[in-house]
Image (tube, grey):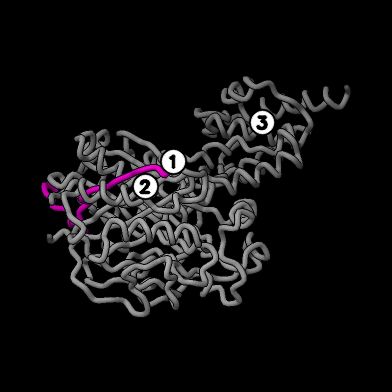
């Protein structure tokens, strides 16, 4: 599932006009890597919520800035499975 | 009379073009921009006539990441500011301290994008609303985006005085320069009202021209058969500088801003005071502010939208100020349509070029002047005349009246 989430993430970032050419699982989402600023992280969160039916708390989007692509995909997968199970 | 501000840059986005000379040529020649909205336009089937501006790719004026959810009003404003600052030949930081530059850019904001997002909210709930919505639509965001793009760090504001907002922005810019709070002000207005909800709001209020098989005949200020205005879109930005500052840096000056006046009708939310007394007072205040008398004004660019009540009230106001010694008067909205607040800036630019060229644009479609609009009309052909001072009127819903006076840079 994580590879599918990774593809969704990259597709979303492309729509949001971010280049994904140099991104991999170790790329940090925030300023230290992909350079998603606060509104971009908020938009990414919304896209994931909409697509996978998960829910993030209001302060979580900012914490995504420190996550890598791999960590983010794992987190989304964990939540999506939880959401499905419940 | 002495200059309070020097106009050193002009940038326009209008239904008749983006180049200042192109816009002036169109209003002089009567090349109407009013069309029946085509099939691919949101107003197709909604309005019989509209004045549609040029397509501008948001990514041509803003970084791609910022250009995705941004209203057309902001895009047009940034484009006009690009052109105005290029025309002024000024680089913020190199030629002027960024804290000594102000931005006063007005307009109603990105209502079309807000309306689209309201539909998405109804359809998809919370997840349908973009987090980029507010920076894409708030009425201050045109000013903010221009400040961000050019690194302008002084005073920034926007006026919400509807169709008077463009004139008001120029007046406020002049006031800032007079006070010494800035050396340069980027001022103007932008409006993108061409979407169904806004169009229907004006239409249902019976403010829009209707029933004209040929859309180019629909906008007819001061004409006996006029029955409303033609909704248009556009943006106008001027770069104003303290005259001494402009001189010191060797800037080319298009014209001087000499004075302005602003009053309120205190009468009705949409209908102008019928006797035009408050509008007249805004013109008198502008004359006093400029140190001029009525005989000094060589051309008056009227607000003249083409509504029955508005044109009659403005005519009464002009007549009460000028009497029989009235300068030539025209409204250029017969060609451009009514770009709401942006009209005031586009029309200021037209007045400035009229001074430079010694040519007054006529009121298009003024075939049969209404006796209730007894003015010294310029109609038919453009009129050659020596022009040293121009008055430009802008009036808005809410009863806001603004008059601005420009003088020849050579005068």
The picture places residue A45, in percent across and down from the top left corner, at: 66, 31
For label 3, the crowd category at 10 Å Cα-Cα, with few meaning under 14, some 14 to 19 and many 20 or more, is many
Q: Is residue B293 left or right of residue B28?
A: left
Q: Secondary structure at mark 2?
A: helix
The picture places residue B138, in percent across and down from the top left corner, at: 51, 39
* Image position of B61 with respect to B138: above or below: below
For label 2, the crowd category at 10 Å Cα-Cα, with few meaning under 14, some 14 to 19 and many 20 or more, is many
**Residues at badges 2 and 1 in contact (C-beta under 8 Å)?**
yes
Kindly identify which chain the residue marked by label 2 belongs to: B
Check the picture and name the quadrant holding the N terminus of chain A. Answer: top right
Query: Can residue B389 be seen in the rendering of this structure?
Result: yes
Q: Provide the residue designation for mark 1.
A: B266
Residues flagged by tags 2 and 3 on a common chain: no
Q: CA distance from mark 2 to mark 3?
A: 53 Å
Quick check: is B254 in the magenta stretch? yes
Check the picture and name the quadrant holding the C terminus of chain A. Answer: top right
* Image position of B180 with respect to B223: above or below: above
Q: Provide the residue designation for mark 2.
A: B278
Residues flagged by tags 2 and 1 on a common chain: yes
Residue at figure coordinates x 61%, y 31% from the top left: A42
**Residues at badges 2 and 3 in contact (C-beta under 8 Å)?**
no
Query: Can residue B190 be seen in the rendering of this structure?
Result: no
The picture places residue B139, in percent across and down from the top left corner, at: 48, 40
Q: Which residues are magenta?
A: B247-266
Kindly identify which chain the residue marked by label 1 belongs to: B
Q: CA distance from mark 2 to mark 1?
A: 9 Å
Frontmost of labels 2 and 3 is 2
Q: Which mark is residue A45?
A: 3
Q: Which mark is residue B326?
A: none
Quick check: is B398 in the magenta stretch? no
Q: Secondary structure at mark 1?
A: loop
């Amino acid at each position: 599932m994580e590879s599918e989430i990774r593809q969704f993430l990259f597709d979303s970032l492309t729509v949001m006009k971010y280049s994904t050419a140099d991104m991999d699982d170790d790329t940090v989402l925030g300023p230290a890597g992909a350079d998603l600023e606060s509104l971009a992280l908020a938009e990414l969160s919304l896209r994931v919520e909409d697509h996978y039916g998960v829910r993030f708390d209001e302060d979580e989007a900012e914490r995504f800035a420190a996550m890598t692509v791999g960590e983010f995909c794992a987190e989304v997968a964990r939540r999506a499975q939880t959401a499905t199970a419940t | 009379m002495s200059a309070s501000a020097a106009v050193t840059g002009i940038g326009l986005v209008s239904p008749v073009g983006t180049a200042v000379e192109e816009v002036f040529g169109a209003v002089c020649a009567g090349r109407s921009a009013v069309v029946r909205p085509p099939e691919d336009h949101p107003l197709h089937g909604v309005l019989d006539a509209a004045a549609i501006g040029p397509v501008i790719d948001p990514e041509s004026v803003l970084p791609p990441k910022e250009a995705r959810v941004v209203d057309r009003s902001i895009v047009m404003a940034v484009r006009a500011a690009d052109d105005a600052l290029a025309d002024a030949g000024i680089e913020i930081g190199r030629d002027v301290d960024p804290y000594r530059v102000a931005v006063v850019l007005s307009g109603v904001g990105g209502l079309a994008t807000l309306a689209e997002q309201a539909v998405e909210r109804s359809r998809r709930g919370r997840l349908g609303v973009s987090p980029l919505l507010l920076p894409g639509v708030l009425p201050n965001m045109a000013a903010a985006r221009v400040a961000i793009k050019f690194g302008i760090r002084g005073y920034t504001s926007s006026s919400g005085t509807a169709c008077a907002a463009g004139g008001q922005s120029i007046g406020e810019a002049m006031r800032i320069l007079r006070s010494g709070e800035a050396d340069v002000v980027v001022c103007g207005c932008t409006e993108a009202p061409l979407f169904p909800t806004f169009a229907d709001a004006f239409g249902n209020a019976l403010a829009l021209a209707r029933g004209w098989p040929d859309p180019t005949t629909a906008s007819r200020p001061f004409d006996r058969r006029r029955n409303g205005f033609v909704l248009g879109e556009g943006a106008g930005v001027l770069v104003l500088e303290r005259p001494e500052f402009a001189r010191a840096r060797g800037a080319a000056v298009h014209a001087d801003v000499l004075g302005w006046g602003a009053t309120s009708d205190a009468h009705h939310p949409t209908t102008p005071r019928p006797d035009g007394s408050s509008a007249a007072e805004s013109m008198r205040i502008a004359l006093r502010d400029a140190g001029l008398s009525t005989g000094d004004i060589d051309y008056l660019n009227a607000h003249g939208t083409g509504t029955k009540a508005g044109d009659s009230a403005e005519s009464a106001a002009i007549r009460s100020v000028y009497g029989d010694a009235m300068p030539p008067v025209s409204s250029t909205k017969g060609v451009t349509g009514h770009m709401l607040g942006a009209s005031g800036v586009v029309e200021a630019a037209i007045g400035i070029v009229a001074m430079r060229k010694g040519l007054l644009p006529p009121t298009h479609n003024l075939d049969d002047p209404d006796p209730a609009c007894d003015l010294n009309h310029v109609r038919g052909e453009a009129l050659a005349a020596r022009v040293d001072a121009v008055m430009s009127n802008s009036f808005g819903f809410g009863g806001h009246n603004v008059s601005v006076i420009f003088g020849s840079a050579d005068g």
